[in-house]
Amino acid sequence: MNTAYAQTVLGKIPSEKLGVALSHEHLIVKPNNSDSYYEQYTLDDAGKSTEETISFKQSGGNTIVEMTPINYGRNPLLLKKISENAGIHIICTTGFHEEKFLPNWIFSMDDDSIKQKLLNEINIGIDGTTIKPGVLKIGTSLNKVTETEKRLIRIVSDVHKETGLPISTHCSKGTKAIEQARFFLENGVDPSRVIIGHVDIPNDIELLIELCRLGFNVQIDHVGRDLANNDATKVKLIVDVINAGYINQVFLSGDMGKKGYLPAYGGTPGLSYFLKDLKGELMKKISEEDYYHILKINPRRFFTITTRVNE
């Protein structure tokens, strides 16, 4: 008999215990790229990341979905340590970034072998640990979907249908979101089990509404970039999606995988921003009930796993 739960780095928990959740963040990340540009996107100090996570908890947060995928500096043991020390639920991921960040073995391994690798992480554990992911990731490139990315969407779709893990995506700069959605539909994926990510970057409400009409979830995850204007553009997007009738399909996060966004690393505004300044701005436009619907009810539904996964 199947039971509903959320899979965290510390094990299964009842999904109602997730509480206030950020659905796309990075606590430990190190892009596999030698370009010095990516140094600012390297978060590899567990102490500082724990400090940032504690700040989120002290502001009223309960869960962070950590979306660092394979070959991008993912470290489940450090995530477990952060979860234990901060007293925060952390859901980690399996799956892949866009093509430029893929491991070399993707291009020589057949589909069944890639699928089995993902299944092993889900059913046994990541990188020789017993730590299991609670969400699948797939990415597409800026202004294009490569043949390799299409292939990986098919594989991830098959893994999703076999395991029940939800899918959360990376759309580079919010491009090719509709194409992603169509590929998932072609591969028989229930759109309610997919979050299309970064689609707030173009600031195009019609894009978000079209994705919602197709049944997908949309993630507004680039807040905190326009502090001078109190994130007015992102606040308006959130309000407009709610007013269009799609509150059940809106997710909120910051994708703050960069030193310049986290006070513990010398940046701003930090993970507590969602429960302080941004909440204050949203409360001028929406009800508190709607605010917590986005941050509690939607993540609880989405990150619940109901299909049996082998122990």
Image (cartoon, rainbow, N blue to C red):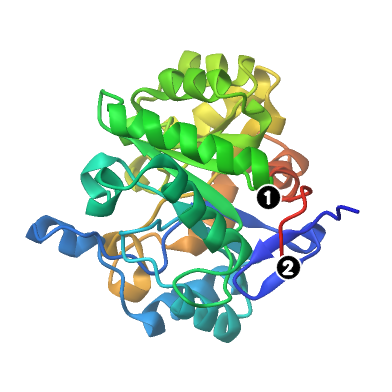
Question: Image check: 140 left or right of 100?
Answer: right
Of the two numbered discs 2 and 1 in the rendering, the one whose residue sits closer to the viewer = 2
Mark 2, secondary structure of its residue? strand
Q: Residues within 10 Å of mark 2 (few under 14, many from 20)?
A: some
Q: Which residue corresponds to mark 2?
A: 12
Can see residue 172? Answer: yes
Q: Going by the image, does 308 lie left or right of 178?
A: right
Q: Which mark is residue 157?
A: none
Which of 300 and 115 lies nearest the eye of the viewer? 115
Left or right of 305? Residue 228 is left
| Dot 2 or dot 1, earlier in sequence | 2
**Label at residue 303:** 1
Residue 171 in percent (x, y) is at 37, 34
Please state which of residues 280 and 37 is positioned toward the viewer in this rendering. 37
Circle 2: residue type: Lys
Residue type at numbered disc 1? Phe
In this view, 27 is above or below 155: below
Q: Residue at point 53% right, 25% down?
A: 184
What residue is at 25 percent from the left and 49 percent from the top?
Answer: 101
Res 144 quadrant in image: top left
Q: Position of residue 293 (x, y in %)?
A: 73, 42
CA–CA distance between discs 2 and 1?
A: 11 Å
